[in-house]
Image (cartoon, grey):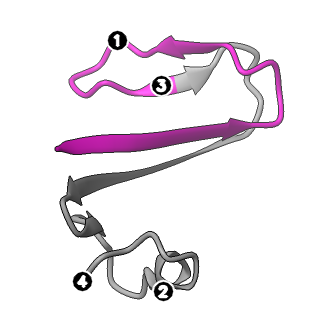
Amino acid sequence: MTFSIEIYLTTGSGEMRFLTNEVASLVTADGAPAAYWEHIVAVTATGCEVLDLRAGEDPAWAEVRGIRGE
């Protein structure tokens, strides 16, 4: 099974709206600063794996908590 974890952090109300452009861009409705983060995770019989790690990202935090299977 695979799924996407998508986190959108904002300092404002949290209400979002889509921009009408060629990509599905989101902005905060109140103009507050925001940050977006996403990963795709595969869950297998032996654990889980982050499929789209970027250069410099370290998945070791999962090993410490015993949730990453290798």
Badge 3 or badge 1: first in the primary sequence: 1
How many C-alpha atoms fall within 10 Å of the one at disc 4: few (<14), some, or many (≥20)? Answer: few
What's the magenta region? 1-26
> Circle 1 sits in a helix, a strand or a loop, which is it?
loop
In contact (CB < 8 Å): disc 3 and disc 2: no
Amino acid at circle 4: Glu
How many C-alpha atoms fall within 10 Å of the one at disc 2: few (<14), some, or many (≥20)? Answer: few
> Circle 4 sits in a helix, a strand or a loop, which is it?
loop
Identified at 29% across, 55% down, the residue is 41
Amino acid at circle 1: Thr
Residue at the disc numbered 3: 26
Badge 1 or badge 4: first in the primary sequence: 1
Q: For marks 1 and 4, give the CA distance.
A: 42 Å
Amino acid at circle 3: Leu
Q: For marks 4 and 2, give the CA distance.
A: 12 Å
User: Which numbered mark, 4 or 3, is in the foreground of this view?
Assistant: 4
Identified at 72% across, 21% down, the residue is 14
Report the disc number at residue 31.
none
Amino acid at circle 2: Ala
User: Which numbered mark, 3 or 2, is in the foreground of this view?
Assistant: 2
In contact (CB < 8 Å): disc 1 and disc 4: no
Relative side of 16 to 25, left or right: right
User: Which numbered mark, 4 or 2, is in the foreground of this view?
Assistant: 4
Residue at the disc numbered 4: 70
Task: State whether residue 24 is above or below residue 63.
Answer: above
> Circle 3 sits in a helix, a strand or a loop, which is it?
strand
